[in-house]
Image (cartoon, rainbow, N blue to C red):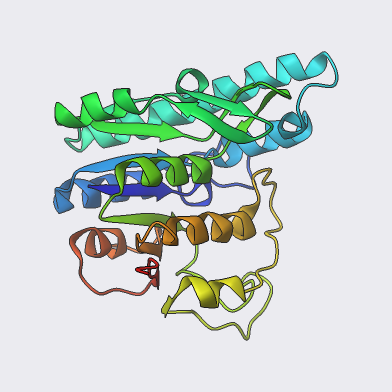
Amino acid sequence: MIILKLGGSVITDKTKEGSFRKKVMDNLSKEIKKANKQIILIHGAGSFGHIHAKKYRLNEGFSRDEQIHGFSVTHEMVQRLNSMVLKSLQNNGIPAVSISPHSAVKLDDHKLVSMDYNVFEEYLKKQFTPVTFGDVVLDKKLSFSICSGDLLAMALANYFKPEKVIFALDEDGIYTSNPKIDKNVKLIDSTTIDELERLKTLADVHADVTGGMSGKIETIKNISKLGIDTILLNGNKPDRLYKVLVGEDTKSTIVYGDKK
């Protein structure tokens, strides 16, 4: 089984509120179908979630009444994106079902307290493809906060111990610095957790309340500690996802799991 995270920067235009990149998602759905692998799919919130979450400062927890409205609006927006992702998968012959963190996850001061893994297991046993996503959720200490797609990827990897974890990004993989602002960067083809510890990545310029690439690297380090390989690839480039799903070489970054 493989855990696949589709970044919000791939399936949405993060500079435009509620902008779904249907053609990109349809291409990814075709590649997932063609690979014919059992997967749990996670997708980011992109411009459907981050803009409102940042506006209402939802990741900081409850401090004023207008945040209640902001929470509701943000949840509706990410549910809308999830419906479009499901539709794309289903149109390409994938029996996708949605599992919302809103009802399956509990946090306490941003940290995962519990997650209903049984529902994922039951759907997998019945040959469905579970789909979950970054969402706003209740938080014991803060009243509410954000459950990111990366947090979900880490939790699911820890529970299911998949063959590998794949992150589809809007870049070719991990670079020596931020490729959006540094023209002299180099793509890191492969690395280990020890080398990743020394890597510094600058923050993305777009609205992202869940840590951007720096937060993702922290997630990957934790997945590596489980002995699981993580592969980062460009979801906008045709066939790269398919090749990684089936184990073929392609342009990407692989972070080897710590096998100690």
Q: Residue farthest to the bottom?
A: 184
Residue 87 position within the rendered picture, expressed as x and y whole percent measured from the top left? 31, 29
Q: Judge from the rendering whether residue 232 lies leftward or rightward of residue 212; answer left or right.
A: left
Tell me what residue is drawn at x 49 percent, y 66 percent. 171
Q: Residue farthest to the right?
A: 64
Q: Judge from the rendering whether residue 64 lies leftward or rightward of residue 82; answer left or right.
A: right
Q: In this view, does 88 lie above or below 118?
A: below
Task: Give residue 142's quadrant in the image.
Answer: top right
Task: Give residue 177's quadrant in the image.
Answer: bottom right
Tell me what residue is drawn at x 42 percent, y 56 percent. 167
Q: Judge from the rendering whether residue 222 lies leftward or rightward of residue 126; answer left or right.
A: right
Number of marks = 0
Tell me what residue is drawn at x 27 percent, y 63 percent. 244
Task: Give residue 226's quadrant in the image.
Answer: bottom left
Relative depth, front residue between 68 and 164: 164
Q: Judge from the rendering whether residue 71 lies leftward or rightward of residue 160; answer left or right.
A: right
Q: Is residue 248 visible?
A: yes
Residue 216 position within the rendered picture, expressed as x and y whole percent measured from the top left? 55, 56
Location of the C terminus (image quadrant): bottom left
Tell me what residue is drawn at x 30 percent, y 59 percent. 241
Residue 137 position within the rendered picture, expressed as x and y whole percent measured from the top left? 59, 24
Relative depth, front residue between 49 and 190: 190
Q: Can residue 17 be seen in this view?
A: no
Residue 258 position within the rendered picture, expressed as x and y whole percent measured from the top left? 40, 67
Relative depth, front residue between 164 and 91: 164
